Structure formats: structure tokens, C-alpha cells
Image: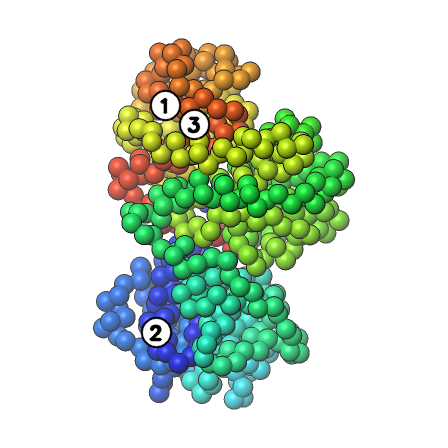
Amino acid sequence: MCGIVGYVGRREAAPLLVQGLRRLEYRGYDSFGIATRDKDLLVLKHKGKISDTVFVSNPLPGGLGIGHTRWATHGVPNDVNAHPHVDCTHNIAVVHNGVIENYSELRKQLTARGHHFSSQTDTEVIPHLIEENYEGDLLEAVRRTVAVLHGSYALLAIAQDDDRVIAAREKSPLVLGIGDGEMLAASDMTPLLEHTERVVFLEDGDIASLSADHYEILRAGIPVTRPVEIVDWGVEDVKKGAFEHYMLKEIYEQPQVFYETVRTATDESIVPLFKKVPGVTVVACGTSYHAGLVFKYLLEGMCSIPVRVELASEFKYFTPPIRDLVVAVTQSGETADTLAALRKAKAHNCMTLAVTNVQGSTVTRIADQTIFTRAGPEIGVAATKSFTAQLAVFMQVANLLCDRELDEVLSRGHLAISEVFLMDLGKAVTLCKDAGLIFFVGRGPFYPVALEGALKMKEISYIPAEGYAAGELKHGPFALLTPETPVVAICTPGNTYDVMISNIKEMKARGAPMVGIGEEGDSELEEIVDVFVPLPRSPLAIRILTTSVVFQLLSYYTAKALEREIDKPRNLAKSVTVE
Ligand code: AGP
């Protein structure tokens, strides 16, 4: 969702801000803008995608500035609603990520006191409030301002007659980059990697003042110290390299990601956590929710530990009466619904564990314990390597809980993923690309894999796609089966093989073109489907990985054939930081 970046230091701010905004593009946005301080406060903002021409024709001077990519919540995407927003005197500029819940009341009060508003945004109340509170000290003015804000915010403010960038955080991420003669602030680490590896993660309620050589963090007006951490990602990790899309690069990184995550997620101290509780509840959204569903099959099947998997957005409002270990799964560590569900679980005195990909993210501060996935930065909006890394964590957890019975299998996972890259999915893509609707079906752990396949397909190709447990299709969806409705079915050895073969025949009999993902040499399956995708013979855990990767590639190449904007699908944000 919105991204913010700020800079103060020895260099020209504008090019750094623009470069920073480009790094934040992956979060999703519909407009952008920057403000710098020179002789005057200069603001440039536009609807649409960041374009160099805008900045080349209007180079904003100044060594201090703030920038923003906006994902509209209050007010349509247009030039006026784009950030930064300024006060009546054009002395103060603000960028903001989050939602000010009491903005309409504040706006009425400010209007009654003579302030003039130009935009429809909730954010615009902030510069006007700062204007009222400003008596020559921007830090103090921001402190007084945030005291009346309700809701979530990561905000940066600058003033024409102040040498500092002021940053404030409440329920929305904000990280400082500590440079040499320069300081930065941003919504996440990606814009900072080019400039420094030293970062400070702000906590809710923190206000920071940044000048070129110094930073200070206050909480309730009192200076506090936050640890300076060294980022374990490098700048190369956020570059696309020779790949056409980040998504493809990230798919190809999966062997390494799986290997690294399995290798590092070996802390046996988590075993007692799982053994002390009556059961496990996973809370998550989207792809992370699907990984949680796979975890359920692993933990229940291998370790006889009962697992429930809840959509975080539901759990928060309809919290079940549990005494479980609550596991929050979130790539970004910032998904608002997942954080809210986790807070709810804590309020119910549940023990909590986070599985996340991002160092310093909010989820790591809320959960009692964290296991990190080692996916590196994921820039494509469609989750790929982060899903595989979550599976790696869950497989390793199940392995640790079951006397390492998966050790040998896990040591081969990365090789099995690499083999998928050699497969030819051309015929399957041809069958899918003109479809009006595609079903993905599987049973057992392949049911969540099918859900994830459908999610991937719909989000990047825009073809409606549904994931189903194969047995459910005849309870309604059969009505939709036609020769224009391909079904992609996972049918590999195991106790549901025979019933899957029957299901495939039933679907075929209703005219649906069938893509069968099965084990190589399976002539029975090959004969009944239209397109057969053979997987090397392998144990169940490996097949969960390989079928997932097949679906990622199928979605990718289908979206590519349709010339979709693969890395930034319409209307989506990488990290959903509002409920
Ligand atoms: C899927 O490709 C999406 N990016 C989306 O469903 C994502 O998994 C969901 O928004 C949860 O994100 P998180 O893992 O960062 O919490």
C-alpha cells in the first residue's frame, strides 16, 4: 500500500526520493509525489505511475525532502489527492501511510477555524494541525498533532524553516536508515539498501527527528534508544537482473530460498511450544493462509497435533474460544488483519509465534517468538518464493516435532524445485489463456495448493479461477463446466488417487478440458486428460512443493501470453496495511 520515503543530508534529495519511490512501487500505488525544501517548499505530485520525465522537466532542488506513493483509500486517485499535502501557508508538507479515523471531525473543526482544504484525503488534516501547533519547532508541532489523531499512521513532515525531517509511527511501519552525513526514513527497508545497511525500526508511539548528522527518537516527549540493526538483505536482492519480471526471478530463486530456509529454521526450542498446547491455530491472509492450510495437513498427518486455520480478517471479529498456540503467518509482517488477529490472540492469553520474512516487521514485535523465512525481498505482488519459504518452515517444524523423519526429503527439496524449471507447460498455457473460468482441484494437502494455484492465476492473468477440493465440484460448480472451462487437477499417488481419477473422468464427461498434474509414467492419468504434466517420482512433501511451482509458472506464462502487468496487477497492493 502507500509507501513513504524521506531524506536529509549532503546530497540532493529529489533523485534519492524518486529512486526510493521506485523501490516502493511494488507495494502498489496509483499516484506519487515529492516535496523538497529549498528557498521555498516545492511540491510535485501526479496521478499515475512514476515517470522520469516529470522529474527531469521539474528538477526539485534541496537537500531535504519527502516522497510518497499513494494507494487511494479516502478520495479518488488524482493529482490533488496525491501526497505530499501542505498547510494553508505552504510552509509544511506531509506524507502519510495509514488511515486517520477521526479525520472528518478534525476537518470540520479545522474548517470552522478558517483552514482551507484542497483534497478529499484524511491525510490533509495533518499539515493543517501542524500549522496550528507550529511555533518554530516542527518536532514539537508534530508531537502535539499526533496526540489528537486516531487511527494508523507512518508520517513524515517537513517545514520551510526547519532543517529536519520529522517522522512519527503508530500502527504503520516506519524504518530509519542511518547513513554517513545523511539520514533516511521509509515504509520498509527496500529504499534504504542502496545507501546504508544500518537501520532503526521505530515502535508505535515513536516520533523521530532526523537531521544530516543526527537523529533522535522521542516517546511521550522523552528521548528513547532503539537498537541499530544491520540489514541482512543486499541491494542486488531488490534488482530484477536479467529477468523480464520480478515474479519470474522470484520463482527461479526458490531452490535457494527453500534450501536456506530449511537450513536456518532448525531451532529445536520451538518444539516445546507445540507440545505444551491443546492445539495450534494459524491466522493469515491470502497466500500465507494457504501455506497455513498445508501446515494443517502436515502437522495433523505427521504429528497428530490438531490445527485450525483461520482467515485473520475473520478471527479478529469472531475469535474462537481457544487456548492454542497461535501462529501468525505473514510474508511482510505488516498485514493489518493478521496483526489484529495476533493482538486478539494475545489478549486471550494465547502463546504466539510469528512466521515472517521481514526483519524488524511489526509481527516480530507482537509475537512471543518468531521464525524467519529466508526468501529475501519479494517485489512481485504475487507471492511465490515467500510461499515456498513458508512451506519450508512448516515442513521443518513438522520434521523437528517428528524426530526428523523428513530430514532426507528436505535435503532434496531444492533439487526437486529446480527440475520443475525444465518442464514444458506450453500446452497447459494454451488451454488456459482463452478460458473464461479455470478450476484448480486437489485433495488433502493439494487442496490448499489448488487454492493457491487459483489465487495466482486470477491475480496476475485476471482470468476468473476457483480452487476446490476435488470432491466438492459436483456439489454445485459442475453447473459451470463447459468446453471453455478447463480444470487443472493434481492427481498423484496416495490414498486419494483412485477417487481423483474418477473425479477427473466425471469432469471430462461434462466437457471440461482437463490438465492433469501427475507422476511421470502414469499412463492411466495421461490417457484421460487433455494435457498431462508429469512430475518426477517423489515423496509427498516434495510433490507439494513441485505442484505449487508448476502452478506459479502456469499462471506466469498465461499472464504473459495475455500481456498482463505481471509484477503489479491492477488494484492490488503487496502489503495490505489497512483492514
Ligand atoms: C498473493 O499473491 C498475495 N500477495 C496476497 O494474497 C498475500 O499473500 C496476502 O496479502 C498476505 O500477505 P502477507 O503474507 O504479507 O501477510
Secondary structure category for the residue under label 2: helix
Q: Hey, what amino acid is under mark 1?
A: Val
Q: Disc 2, ligand 1: is the CB inside 8 Å?
A: no
Distance from Cα at disc 3 to Cα at disc 2: 47 Å
Secondary structure category for the residue under label 3: strand
User: Which comes sooner in the sequence, label 2 or label 1?
Assistant: 2
Q: Quadrant of the N terminus?
A: bottom left
Q: Hey, what amino acid is under mark 2?
A: Ala
For label 3, the residue is: 440
Distance from Cα at disc 1 to Cα at disc 3: 14 Å
For label 1, the residue is: 533
Measuring from the top left, give residue 85's x and y in whole percent.
Answer: 42, 72
Q: In this view, does 233 lie to the left or right of 269?
A: left
For label 2, the residue is: 14
Q: Residue at x 61, y 65 (%)?
A: 204
Measuring from the top left, give residue 488's x and y in whole percent.
Answer: 39, 25
**Quarter of the image where one finds residue 25:** bottom left
Q: Would residue 329 be visible to someone looking at this image?
A: no
User: Which comes sooner in the sequence, label 1 or label 3?
Assistant: 3
Q: Disc 1, ligand 1: is the CB inside 8 Å?
A: no
Q: Hey, what amino acid is under mark 3?
A: Phe
Between marks 1 and 3 in the image, the one whose residue lies nearer the viewer: 1
- Give whichever of 472, 367 is nearer the camera: 367
- Give whichever of 496, 128 is nearer the camera: 496
Q: Are marks 3 and 2 in contact (CB under 8 Å)?
A: no
The correct choice, above or below, for 545 with respect to 144 in the image is above
The correct choice, above or below, for 131 with respect to 307 in the image is below
Measuring from the top left, give residue 467's x and y in whole percent.
Answer: 46, 30
